[in-house]
Amino acid sequence: MALNYYTSIDLNQNQLIQPRIENLASDPSGVEGQIYFNTANNKLKVYAGGAWATIDTDTDTGITGVTLATGTSTGAPLAESITGRELTLTSNAYDGGSKIGYVPAGGSAAQYLDGAGNWVAIPTGDITGLTAGVGITITSAGGPVPTVAVDYSATGLIDDATSGTSVTLLDADTFLFGDTSGGGVKKGTLSQIKTYIGTPYSGWISRADSGSDDTIQSGDVLDFETALTAPSNNTYFETVQSANKVTFQLNVTTNTNANTIVGRDASGNIVAVGGTMNLTGGSSGSRKTIGQYYTLNDGVIATTQASGNDTTLVATTAFVQQEITAQTIAFTVAGATGSDQTISNGNTLTLTNPAVTAAKGGISTVGVNTDQVRFDLNLGGLTTLSTGYDSSTDYLIISDGGTANKKILPANIPLNDWGIPDGSVAIGTIGGTLYNIIDLKDPVNLQDAATKNYVDTVVTGLLEFKGGFNASTGEITSGSNSGSYLWGGTRVAIAVGDLYIAAGSTSGNFFGNSAYPLTPGDSVYAVTAAAANQSVVTDFAVAQSDTDLATAGANAGAATIGISSYDSANFSVNTGFVSISNVTLGTETTGNYTATVAESAVNNRLGIDVSGATGEGQAAVVGLDIVGQAALGSQVAIDDELIIYDLSSTTNKKVTIADLSSATQGAKSFSTTVTLAAGVAQAITHSGGATGNPTFGYDVMVQCYDATTYETIVVNVDRTSITQITLTADTAPPNDVRVLVQKIG
């Protein structure tokens, strides 16, 4: 692992002996002046001008030798190669086409180099004359200066060309033309000609409702004519010309008769008939059929038929009116209650609904179509029943199995069939009366409700603290019954388990009975229930009656018995505090006791010195004996232990060599983590009052490492004072720097 330097190294003109430059297979990122050795091409390279350059070829102008060689061109006339400081130049011969090179060997004065790179013999002999080929004209063919030109005349180049009349012309086909605007002979394409003359005319097609289509070519005339001859005073058919269209239409507007009927006469001619047209005729009873394109206008006269005639004759308005008047239309509407109603001609049947707030409201009628009325259930406006509910007469409407609507008393719906509430269920009061939940089953599960009787039965007999009382007067001094009395006044009712404790500092007799003395802290509880002013002393049990914590006497019989009793000759008791005095070991004590004090000979107890009298009742002097112990020498182990005085707790304690060494080392060392910027001095206080360490002075050793990679790095270190150092990096380290300071001496 390389040692990372973030500061320059000044050798002060001393030699760098046997160094090795960094070896890499490819160019790294670099800074100006950086060098490395490329192991791929065995070149020493330097970063100069923003790029890597090979030192022995790119920057060194010295060439130790030049070799000339020849070859065949593959495109470039010269090729070069460099091996070390040897330069080889290869001159390549021309090899045809675009392969540039020098003229190859093998030519002579009677040869020329063709485009394939070959030497070809030059044809020899004198020109004795010129002969014009197809489309060529020659003047002064015998010299001395003949002129050769293209013959563009009809009998020249054009007539001599191969016939192309059977060839399908394409837009890209070319032709020659004389340019009158720009001068000279030029070529063009067939597409240019088509653009100039536009799309050629190809005729059009005439089509009728019957017969065959007819193609009308350029110069043709299409004649529109009719086969019928119209009277001179009427025009029944006419043609109207418009853009690209001729319209044929029937025209009877010029006829002098205002009410014109167009028909066909016995000869098949179309004629106009003025006035009315008699549609009757033929044998008796026969009639003419009026087609769907005829309309009977207000001039048509019909014959009024006899009443009751049900034939298909045309009826007059008078006939229709008399038939309707003669009919009587009536029907009866019957309701579930009330009188039947007869609806006759001219009557209107109105379907009504009671108001939604009416006693029997909740129904609305809605007109849907011309012959349809819908009845809707409308409960939104019903009057709210807030009071006066009668569980025996008030019903709910339900759907019985989805097949029939029925009524039901709410009392007949089981409570468990209602949904689970999503909030608190309040029993509340009605008319000021508070109601209870009654007839509950005894609980089984943890969350089941319980009745009062069940709870009373379960908790009866359990102790329940009721308050404190005065042991002298019996007055209850705390709790819900404060101010009442257990005795000596108005006595409270008691239940089994009621617990009271003598409070305050006054002693007394329970119920004034000296057989039950009480001191503060004594407790009594009820064992028999009693009503107010009915309790007696035997209704209670006294848990602790006038019993002190500790007493003293000449012997067990003379002492007042307490929780603990002591011999008054050797012990004194003051408010429960026991003191011992004037006890003779072995005489006034029994069991084991220390008769003498001696130095231990056991390995883990060596080092204790005992002097002075060591018998019973004598003063023995015990001290620590270090001088007389064997020296451990170099065999000290890190888990060996020493005795040390802990100032923080003022107590002797043991300490291992490892812990003592760590603490000692901590008082002489300091560490911290800093971030260094290029060229920026970073001051670090390593000792003194601010750090809790004693002042280190200038004799300190400083080490730095990368806080991320843990590699050792080198930066500038200045000892600026006896409590401070300053770090400076010429280039910024990539990560935070961990700084270690060790005091020497």
Image (cartoon, rainbow, N blue to C red):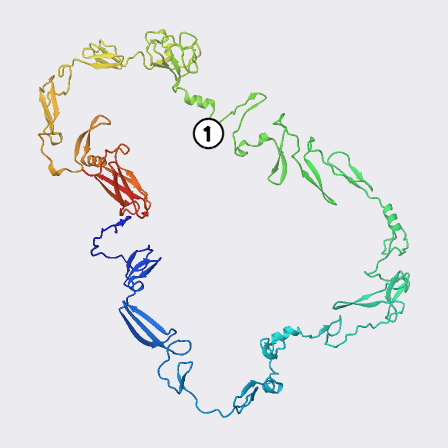
Answer with left or right where residue 627 lies relative to residue 440: left
Foreground of the two, 104 or 664: 104
Q: Residues within 10 Å of mark 1 (few under 14, many from 20)?
A: few
Instruction: Give the vertical position of 625 relative to 303 (above or below).
Output: above
**Residue at the limit of the structure toward the front, as seen here:** 144
Q: Position of residue 513 (x, y in %)?
A: 34, 7
Q: Position of residue 702 (x, y in %)?
A: 24, 42
Helix, strand, or loop for circle 1? loop
Answer with left or right where residue 706 lies relative to residue 318: left
- Give the amino acid type for the residue marked by disc 1 in the picture: Asp
Q: Quadrant of the C terminus?
A: top left
Q: Position of residue 355 (x, y in %)?
A: 71, 33
Foreground of the two, 660 or 457: 660
Foreground of the two, 744 or 331: 744
Instruction: Give the vertical position of 502 relative to 129 (above or below).
Output: above
Where does label 1 land, which residue? 448
Instruction: Give the vertical position of 319 relative to 208 (above or below).
Output: above
Instruction: Give the quarter of the image for residue 378.
Output: top right
Answer with left or right where residue 697 lies relative to residue 346: left
Instruction: Give the quarter of the image for residue 353.
Output: top right
Marker count (numbered): 1
Q: Position of residue 41 (x, y in %)?
A: 29, 64
